[in-house]
């Protein structure tokens, strides 16, 4: 019986035959290409599954390598394997069956008599007309052409042995998620990559404990994903559970796009309802007390808070500021914002008055560091933000006995509310929001209105007279 590789090689020299109709029941999976993580040191191949007539189950067939791994470039390898893939898919649609004798198809459609014995099929002599053909590449002939006039010899047919899937030829769970991380490195920020890495590590660890038989990513089911997310919800908040779902789904989408898994089952899991984190505003008395206390005890932290309060920046945005991002001549600063890769804002006098001379400081140094202004601080932006959050808790929250609802974000909410209410004194709500939008940096009126509603920035005046009962 001829091997599938011989069929694929031979089909390169034949004209395509009309396609046969597919059976009602799916007999095979579409062939796919494994590129070895785009590593030329690993073996590339085409793989597919076919329904075993004895068991009725889809079984992985032997990998098809051909001459692809002799190619020295990725393009050449993929070109060869793509040809194998397309040709194999056509052969499967035309009726090729790895569990049957396909000699008739290989010889061009000649009729072959049924077997005379139960285990041995005897093919009677068939006389072919004399014709000159080009020798097949897998038949090692010394002559360039020969005349075929001899009868076909008896061919012994034995029950095919199902090839055991070579585990090393398939991606393991860790290899698959590492591949997804590698593909994402150029598309997302380093912090996001770190989140992807941690969450995939926890997911794989859980799979090994709860489903030890799962070795490959295509064995992951939706039920397994739901089980992981459910236990994640029990131990954490709904928001954390949803974030894990998003990150894992993003990585598994890469695996689906690269045909490593048939479908992204994590994407089919539902999102649970979660309550957004809320930061309360400071009242005037508490605000004055905090500013007065920090002016004496921690001027660096006070400057950090002033950028949040008067420039309406988020804490992470303040941590991104470098010395060279501030132009004191034009009184402007540029930074990477949440909704823009580069945003420019004015520096109000309330902030300028608190800044020292920056002209002699290295421009690439962070503006506000743990030990002063414009000093070297070799750590990530996220670590800087975490440092100042903990410093604020230690210096301010513990001192003033502030609850969990008060934080650095509360300063931004407090001063945006204060500014909006001040603008409303001499203008209409629309005019006030139009001016406010240019100051806060919101990209649309709708986004600003949603933000103002969330923080309850506008409260109506007393309406008792409108609902007072007659006679009261």
Image (cartoon, grey):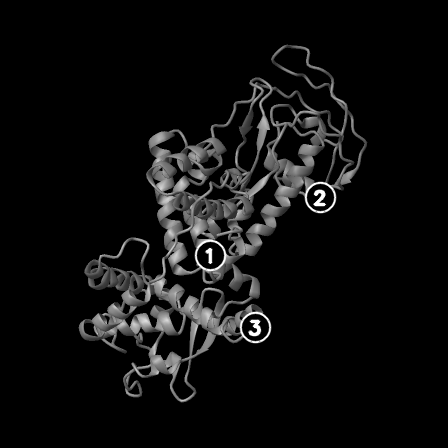
The residue at which mark 2 appears reads as: 13
- Mark 3 crowd level (few <14, some 14–19, many ≥20, 10 Å Cα): few
Nearest to N terminus: mark 1 or mark 2: 2
Residue denoted by label 1: 454
Instruction: Give the answer, above or below, for where 267 lies relative to 311.
Output: above
In the figure, is residue 155 to the left or right of 441? right
Which label belongs to residue 67?
none
Q: Which residue is mark 3?
A: 431
225 over 40 or under it: above or below: above
Q: 5 or 156, which lies in front?
A: 5
The local secondary structure at tag 1 comes to helix
Q: Residue at x 58, y 20 (%)?
A: 56
In the displayed structure, 58 sits above or below 266; it is above
C-alpha gap between disc 2 and disc 3: 75 Å
Local secondary structure at mark 2: loop
For image coordinates 65% across by 24% down, the residue present is 101
The image quarter in which residue 422 lies: bottom left
Residue 117 picture location, percent across and down: 65, 10
Viewer-side residue, 353 vs 109: 353
Left/right of residue 2 with respect to residue 13 in the rendered view: left
219 vs 333: above or below: above
Mark in front: 1 vs 3 = 3
Say left or right for 441 vs 209.
right
Residue 116 location, x and y as percent?
A: 68, 11
């Amino acid at each position: 019986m001829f091997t599938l590789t011989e069929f694929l090689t031979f089909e390169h020299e034949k004209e395509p035959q009309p396609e046969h109709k597919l059976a009602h029941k799916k007999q095979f999976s579409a062939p796919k290409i494994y590129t070895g993580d785009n590593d030329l040191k690993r073996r590339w191949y085409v793989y597919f599954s076919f329904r075993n007539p004895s068991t009725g189950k889809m079984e992985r067939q032997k990998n098809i390598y051909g001459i692809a791994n002799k190619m020295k470039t990725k393009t050449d390898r993929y070109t060869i394997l793509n040809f194998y893939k397309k040709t194999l898919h056509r052969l499967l649609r035309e009726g090729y069956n790895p569990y049957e004798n396909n000699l008739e198809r290989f010889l061009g459609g000649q009729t072959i008599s049924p077997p005379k014995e139960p285990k041995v099929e005897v093919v009677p002599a068939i006389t072919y007309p004399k014709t000159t053909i080009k020798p097949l590449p897998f038949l090692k002939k010394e002559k360039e052409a020969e005349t075929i006039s001899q009868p076909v010899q008896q061919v012994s047919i034995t029950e095919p042995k199902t090839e055991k899937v070579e585990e090393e030829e398939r991606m393991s769970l860790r290899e698959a998620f590492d591949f997804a991380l590698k593909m994402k490195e150029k598309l997302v920020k380093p912090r996001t990559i770190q989140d992807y890495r941690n969450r995939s590590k926890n997911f794989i660890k859980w799979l090994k404990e709860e489903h030890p038989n799962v070795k490959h990513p295509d064995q992951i089911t939706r039920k397994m994903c739901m089980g992981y997310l459910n236990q994640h919800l029990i131990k954490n908040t709904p928001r954390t559970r949803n974030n894990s779902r998003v990150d894992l789904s993003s990585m598994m989408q890469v695996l689906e796009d690269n045909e490593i898994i048939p479908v992204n089952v994590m994407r089919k899991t539902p999102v649970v309802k979660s309550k957004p984190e809320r930061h309360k505003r400071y009242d005037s008395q508490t605000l004055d007390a905090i500013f007065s206390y920090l002016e004496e005890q921690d001027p660096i932290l006070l400057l950090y808070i002033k950028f949040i309060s008067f420039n309406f920046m988020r804490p992470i945005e303040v941590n991104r500021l470098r010395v060279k991002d501030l132009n004191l001549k034009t009184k402007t600063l540029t930074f990477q914002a949440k909704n823009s890769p580069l945003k420019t804002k004015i520096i109000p006098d309330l902030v300028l008055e608190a800044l020292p001379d920056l002209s002699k400081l290295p421009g690439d140094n962070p503006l506000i560091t743990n030990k002063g202004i414009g000093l070297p601080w070799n750590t990530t932006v996220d670590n800087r933000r975490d440092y100042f959050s903990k410093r604020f808790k230690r210096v301010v929250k513990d001192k003033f006995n502030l609850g969990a609802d008060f934080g650095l974000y509360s300063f931004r909410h407090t001063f945006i509310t204060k500014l909006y209410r001040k603008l409303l004194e001499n203008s209409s709500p629309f005019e006030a929001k139009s001016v406010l939008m240019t100051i806060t940096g919101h990209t649309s009126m709708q986004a600003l209105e949603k933000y103002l509603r969330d923080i309850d920035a506008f409260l109506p005046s007393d309406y008792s007279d409108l609902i007072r009962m007659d006679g009261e």
